[in-house]
Image (cartoon, rainbow, N blue to C red):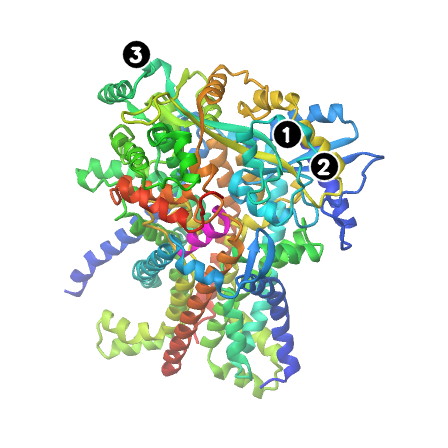
Amino acid sequence: MKTARRAPGRVAVHLLLWGYAVVALLPLVVMLLNSLRPTSEVFTAPLGLPTSPSLRSYGQVWTEASFSTYFMNSLIVTGGAVLLGTAVSALAAFPLARYDFFGNRVLGAYFLAGLMLPIRLGLVPIFYLMDSMGLIDSLLGLTLLYAASGVPFCIFVLSAFYRSLPVELDEAARLDGAGEFRIFGQIMLPLVRPALASVMLFQFVPLWHEFLYPLVLLRSDEKFTIPRGLSQFFGEYTTDWSALFAGLVLATAPLFVLFVLATRQIIAGLTAGMSK
Amino acid sequence: MKRRWIAGAIGALMLALAACAPGGGASGRQEETAGKVTLSLWSWRVEDVKAYEKILAKFEDSHPNINVEFKPFQATEYNNILATGLSGTAGPDVAQLRAYGGLQPLVEAGQLLPLDDKVEALSGFDAKLLEGAKGHTDGKVYGVPFAYQTLQVLYNKKLFADNGIQPPATWDDMIAAARKLKAAGITPFAVAAGPDATWTLPIVHEIFGNARYGSTAFRDAVVGGKKKFTDPDFTASVKLIKDLEPYFPEDVVAVKIPDVQALFATGKAAMYPTGAFDLAPVLKANPSLEVGQFPVPPPPGSPVTTPVTPGWADGSFGVNAKSTHQAEALELVKWMATPEFGQLYATELKQLSAVPGVTPSDPLLAEMAKNYAGNGAPYTLLVDFRYGQPNGDAVFRDEVQKMLAGQADPESVSESVQKGVEQWFKPGN
Amino acid sequence: MPRWRVLAVFLLPAFLLYSVFIVYPLVSALDYSFFEWRGIRQAGFAGLDNYRDLLSVYPYDQQLWRAFAHNALFFAGTMLIQNTVGLLFAVLLFRYGRGKRFLQASFTTPYLVDPLVVGYLWSLLLNPTFGPVNALLKAAGLDSWALPWLGDTNTALPIVILVNAWQWVGFPMLMFSAALAGIPAEYHEAARVDGASAWQAFRRVTLPLLTPAIGVVSVLTFIGNFNAFGLVYAMAGSTGSPAGSTDVLGLLFYRVAFVEGGVEAIGRSSALAVLMFVFIFGVSLLATSYFRRRERRLV
């Protein structure tokens, strides 16, 4: 009887999950298909199968929009920002989550506060700040800004993970005479590895797409990031829908690669180390 | 073009190093080669890069000591980029400026150079267009107007001929034509009221309703405080949009601008009420399209009995008050007030130049220019009611969209517009 | 308890980076709300004038509350749909065999695409004239279901909430998956030995143990929803089409600060940001301390 009740239930679960996978991927397939169709087709019928698929638009975006330069800049800025932001946050979240020192709550709230404000709000003061530091038209300036912008989110999520680790872990290590840095580096950090991969992924994606600050802070073409460069390109070729979709695919593709790498990390971590 | 970008970029890099010291100046650009000055020209017209490079090459020919670097930015973010750029390092020397209300934040912050006694040719410009480049409180001119827009109906000549329709001489003719087209399965008017199109609703209203509310006479009365937007004539002009809705695409509130451009360009819609600015994109989408234009005949009951062509100044070019190359920047804007620039601008960009005496080479644009010169009128919600918040046209577009969604009537649209502008507008200002 | 010097090594890098590049500019921006502005030039102290304008000048006085109500609905809808479905997926996938990684990855991929692009793609799919969604509904004989979706004041906001959930569902799913993996297997076994049904075991054992994850997801959802901008902007424009039925605080801020510009834009938009901040920060603090207390009770 038990199996009889289970079988239809299991079919329903499979149907639900695989059915939803189609819903999740379909719009992205539209994007991919349209990048292979000529603009005239996209213009008259925005949705449809390519009659004669062509990679022409990709070549156009790659050469005319100097995509490779934008790609390197985006990688430097976003990658640098995520590494820096996560590193300083992983350090800071540890004492915030595991020690009850004076000012802990206030400091926690101070870091949390940054999550609540739209970063657009700071446009004018950030411009003046960067200007006074000589960081206009500088990839370093953008990297520092992005790194700082990820700190609140990182600290918030990582403290929750540090908190969920049993207290006995550090107590035992401390009895063995381990210093705080060793406890952090050798015990805590490996245990929150899946969380580190998640927060890096969740920081990386919005920063990769961010276009407002590159618009205001960058001036020269050779320093443009992908969104900044593509916005320029799309502006110049406003009606070239095919190229637009090709550009979007190219801009998103690196994220897919990163994502596959990150999920491997996340899942490996989940299955290996997390049982307490 | 590529090489120029790179050259500019390297120049900017060198200046960035040189300009780290405080007080590096607005453009901060050091003389690169002996005596040669590079001006930075900012614009929101990303799509016009190639045309501007061509136009500016002519300027560089006649001014061998000046290089002009054209830097376009995304239009939606341009206002902020310009406001910050004008106050910091490596800003523009010359910048494309928004007109009317959109210009005021820069004027009030003292970021622009007044041009009245510096560019003599300005005195020859049309006073109506010059209005768009003036400081609202001080009345000084801060920019050389580059273009103006006119509003009318574009139509598909082939569809008209196929259905035995002439450009309408009366309002009733136009409605009869619309009815006929609809019966033939063609969308009569390509009108969008979707998320990206709310700003076009006041434009549609101007095209169909300007004569009905009384055109320039009504505008003067409202600005002078003798009439209000709650006037029955204005309400009647709003009602026209509701009356015409059956001839718009179905579910007009969900229809977006690319949708209607495609409808018109592919011959699925016969008439496109829009500005001169849409002619070039429509023809780019379908170069073989045969397009005509007509100003809408006055609706019954209109205080004005001849067809009106509403219009406004598009924007101007002004000089950064902090530019370190003001003399050269002035050279450039002076040149932008000459017929040479006007003619190049009109030809390269297929727009209506604001420079007096320039006639468009495109026959259709020439017709529009003639209509505007003969019987033009200000698009008053934009021209006069953007000097405070809420903008007159912003309240109007929200309320008209509500009306098309069935949540407001013409009376409440008029009342809301009046209530909105009353928040800051004092008659006679 | 480590010494202060050790604490400083842990805390200072993040503190400095964050203070210089985020807190300092944002605090300056908040300070801007107390000044009168002429474009980008400060014209004098204004006290609370900008706040008064925001709360009394038509139509902002009405739009503010309307946008606030829409944000509240947005949050409620997202909690109800996105986070519940995310939890469901996490639970169903927890012991799922083949294809687990593929499914997890596909549910999360929409997140990788720029919200502006997501909004644009869904507008195409939901287009009343050529969109496949309505074509499918009509093909299935459900003509009366083929609504103009984003052009109907009743359906636009729910659609935006659904598309947002579509994009973000991977986030709660991954968070809950991580938390589920962290629950020791003995707990489940203990419940099963007691003879509890799968549902009872979930309710009594799993769900309470997920409290920390639920707390993090709820607070981040709240903050994210009350700052929502990109997707709504792409689907409904800066005015929250149609007829303001999707207007949210993020759009209102954008209009006051950027679209209508205006001479006083900086002061008024900063005042709006302060109000948003006070509310979001206050509620988030209350919520975190609530979840913290629940967590303590667990230990």
The chain ID associated with circle 2 is B
Residue type beneath disc 3: Asp
The stretch in magenta equals C249-260
In the displayed structure, does residue C126 sit left or right of residue C45? left
Q: Position of residue B113 (x, y in %)?
A: 67, 41
> What is the CA distance from the residue labelled 1 to the residue labelled 3?
47 Å
Judging by the rendered image, the residue that carries numbered circle 1 is: B122
Disc 1 residue crowd, few under 14, some 14–19, many 20+, Cα 10 Å? many
Residue at numbered disc 2: B39
Instruction: Give the numbered dot on residue B321.
Output: none
Quadrant holding the N terminus of chain B = top right
Crowdedness of circle 2 by 10 Å Cα count: few (<14), some, many (20+)? many
**Above or below A77: residue B260:** above
Which sits in the foreground, B215 or A32? B215
Residue furthest out toward the bottom: A175
Which residue is disc 3 drawn over?
B162
By secondary structure, the bulk of the magenta-drawn segment is best described as helix
**Amino acid marked by disc 1:** Leu
The extreme right residue here reads: B34
Q: Is residue C255 magenta?
A: yes
